[in-house]
Image: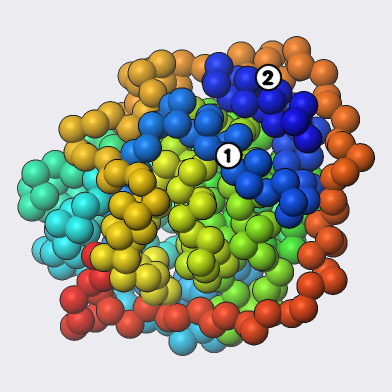
Amino acid sequence: MDELLNSLVETGLRGGTPTRNEALAVLRTSDDDLLDVVAAAGKVRRRWFGRRVKLNYLVNLKSGLCPEDCSYCSQRLGSQADILKYTWLKPEEAADAAAAGVRGGAKRVCVVASGRGPTDGDVARVSRTIEAIKERTGGVEVCACLGLLSDGQAERLRAAGADAYNHNLNTAEATYGDICTTHTYDDRVATVKEARTAGLSPCSGLIAGMGESDEDLVDVVFSLRELDVDSVPVNFLLPFEGTPLADQWNLTPQRVLRILAMVRFVCPDVEVRLAAGREVHLRSLQPLALHMVNSIFLGDYLTSEGQAGKADLEMIADAGFEVEDAETTTMPAHRNGAGGAAGGAATSATTVAQEAAAVPDAPVPESAVPESAVAGRPERPQARVAVRRRGAGTELPPNA
Ligand code: SF4
């Protein structure tokens, strides 16, 4: 174990990429080794991001009624989840919600809309929204997340002031067809590339807990590393009643921490954001995750409620971290300016691949404990997903 962790830390401190086998071994460490794994990932996190935590704030511009069939999503075609459903917020409404997030400490606002992808009219509408948010908040970072992009749309969003674009890969290429049939993994990769080409900081991540294998998780994280994205949101499945994955309650807090450690080791100098599922799956272990991720969402998620924004801030302070201020550049200096608007990567995908190839695959330690090691535990009471009933699209104030 010491040999594995020493190798991962040494690689992470120089911004390199571990081998695939090393990444797999992290997922298969035992609970006895968990704090050592967290501490090792914490060294890499502090090397590139100190003790800063970037806060991001979600504004769901348009909720539900999507024609796509992503099985994990409460907004999907045929979803029976009892979520808020509404059409486009007006620019002023979105700016109100965004301003609440910024007052709460957020330095990035993520404007999101359900759907396969925007029409040109939608892009014009979101452009007006971005302008309204920038005007109201004094220029907060804005990330748009509108689905698959068509020709010229990324450029128009960039011209309107968007800093970043999010489009998650979600899971491994080999199993993408198991979670969605209405678009492909390649469609998603193409949109991430279009965003980067337009000068938007590429943000793309994953969802864990959908029944995927360790190998699938490692595959998607290595794909994100090769795509050289600036930020990686790590979501943990919220199994909404009324969706096909409603019974997929298969994450433990320990498993979540191991996944976050693996992502940090594979993407050492990238913004790793702990996203949806934080409260539900980590529960009382949330603060440990801050030692590995450098970014979280403040308050609520798109269709579910998070803990109170005030509790997020208290957790950060109690754990000895600090909220990153607007003047501080999130990305390490070597990644700034080479890619998207919020700072791209100097480490090219080729370099990463070469580094990976240069390090022989480490054997998975004998002591590695398979995923099924958690099977013998008593079943915990099933947590419930709290559907969002406040903030954007409601009369109630947002949670920030
Ligand atoms: S395209 Fe987006 S909103 Fe639509 S079902 Fe898939 S994840 Fe949900």
35 on left or right of 88:
right
Give the residue displayed 44% in from the left and 63% down from the top.
Answer: 115
Give the residue displayed 17% in from the left and 62% down from the top.
Answer: 100
**Residue named by callout 1:** 39
Assign the N terminus to one quadrant of the image. top right
Mark 2 Cα shell of 10 Å, populated few (<14), some (14-19), many (≥20): some
Q: Quadrant of residue 393?
A: bottom left
Q: Is residue 187 visible?
A: no
Which of marks 2 and 1 precedes in the sequence? Answer: 1
Element carrying mark 1: helix
Give the residue displayed 39% in from the left and 23% down from the top.
Answer: 332
Mark 1 Cα shell of 10 Å, populated few (<14), some (14-19), many (≥20): some
Residue 150 picture location, percent across and down: 43, 44
From the viewer's perspective, is residue 258 above or below residue 70? above
Marks 1 and 2: CB-CB under 8 Å? no
Residue 323 picture location, percent across and down: 28, 45
Give the residue displayed 54% in from the left and 82% down from the top.
Answer: 384
94 on left or right of 217:
left
From the viewer's perspective, is residue 352 above or below residue 190? above
Element carrying mark 2: helix
Q: From mark 1 to mark 2, how far is it between C-alphas?
A: 26 Å
Q: Can residue 106 be seen in this view?
A: yes
**Residue named by callout 2:** 353
Q: Quadrant of residue 235?
A: bottom right
Disc 2 marks which amino acid? Answer: Ala
Of circles 1 and 2, the one toward us is: 1
Residue 187 picture location, percent across and down: 58, 45
